[in-house]
């Protein structure tokens, strides 16, 4: 192997004419290969970062919007007075992607017995956006699960008002009363 490599380099040197030139070409070639290999490590992917930031922003916006809408309704309850609402979510929104399913069946028979083997293959459906980039087709998006709600209200010390606020929040957000805390505001 070394003889072949030496023979190859000697022939290359004869064609190029100088060992210094060959050395420079080899160094440049190796440096190029190393830079290409390191390009993914050196420059982080901006696409992944921006996507995760967008998802966090959209979940925060969703929760902020829910808080505002719930606050607007609760503050209209007789006796509630001024209100401030905070909602916490357990997880981010979940995307359900459209898939194509293909089922293949193979049957085998051994005398009295026959066997059927089925294979199901699922592939995510990809579509091109307006800029020509391929993206997975989103079938549905499940909003974040609400973990708890805190309602600060000026009228929360009245048990009837407290109950009305709890029932309103329970109905608006679809959470159990055990996840709702109504507290008197200062």
Image: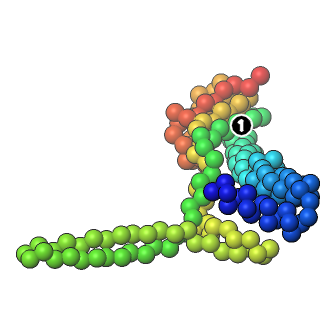
The residue closer to the viewer here, 1 or 129, is 1
Please provide percent x and percent y for residue 106. 28, 76
Q: Is residue 45 above or below residue 78?
A: below
Please provide percent x and percent y for residue 41. 76, 48
Please provide percent x and percent y for residue 66. 70, 48
- Residue 185 in the figure: left or right of residue 106: right
Look at the image and tell me in which quarter the N terminus lies. bottom right
Q: Badge 1, how many Cα within 10 Å: few under 14, some, many 20+?
A: many
Is residue 58 something one can see in this rendering?
Answer: no
- Residue 113 in the figure: left or right of residue 156: left
Choose top left, top right, bottom left or bottom right for residue 9.
bottom right
Circle count = 1
- Residue 48 in the figure: left or right of residue 102: right
Please name the colour scheme applied to the rendered image.
rainbow
Secondary structure beneath dot 1 equals strand
Q: Residue at x 67, y 39 (%)?
A: 87
The residue closer to the viewer here, 56 or 82, is 56
Is residue 10 something one can see in this rendering?
Answer: yes
Q: Residue lying furthest left in this view? A: 112
Q: Is residue 75 above or below residue 55?
A: above
The residue closer to the viewer here, 186 or 3, is 3
Q: Is residue 121 above or below residue 43?
A: below
Q: Residue at x 79, y 61 (%)?
A: 10
Look at the image and tell me in which quarter the C terminus lies. top right
Q: Residue at x 78, y 56 (%)?
A: 33
Q: Which residue is mark 1?
A: 85
């Amino acid at each position: 192997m070394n003889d072949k490599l030496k023979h190859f380099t000697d022939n290359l040197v004869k064609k190029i004419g100088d060992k210094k030139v060959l050395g420079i070409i080899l160094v440049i070639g190796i440096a190029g290969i190393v830079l290409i290999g390191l390009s993914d490590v050196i420059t982080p992917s901006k696409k992944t970062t921006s996507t995760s930031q967008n998802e966090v922003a959209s979940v925060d916006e969703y929760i902020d919007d829910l808080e505002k809408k719930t606050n607007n309704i609760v503050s209209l309850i007789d006796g509630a007075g001024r209100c401030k609402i905070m909602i916490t979510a357990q997880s981010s929104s979940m995307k359900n992607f459209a898939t194509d399913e293909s089922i293949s069946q193979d049957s085998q028979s051994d005398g009295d017995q026959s066997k059927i083997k089925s294979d199901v293959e699922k592939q995510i459906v990809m579509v091109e956006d307006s800029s020509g980039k391929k993206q997975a087709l989103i079938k549905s998006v499940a909003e974040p699960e609400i973990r708890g709600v805190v309602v600060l209200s000026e009228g929360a010390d009245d048990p009837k008002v407290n109950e009305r606020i709890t029932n309103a929040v329970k109905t608006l957000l679809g959470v159990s009363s055990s996840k709702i805390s109504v507290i008197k505001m200062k």
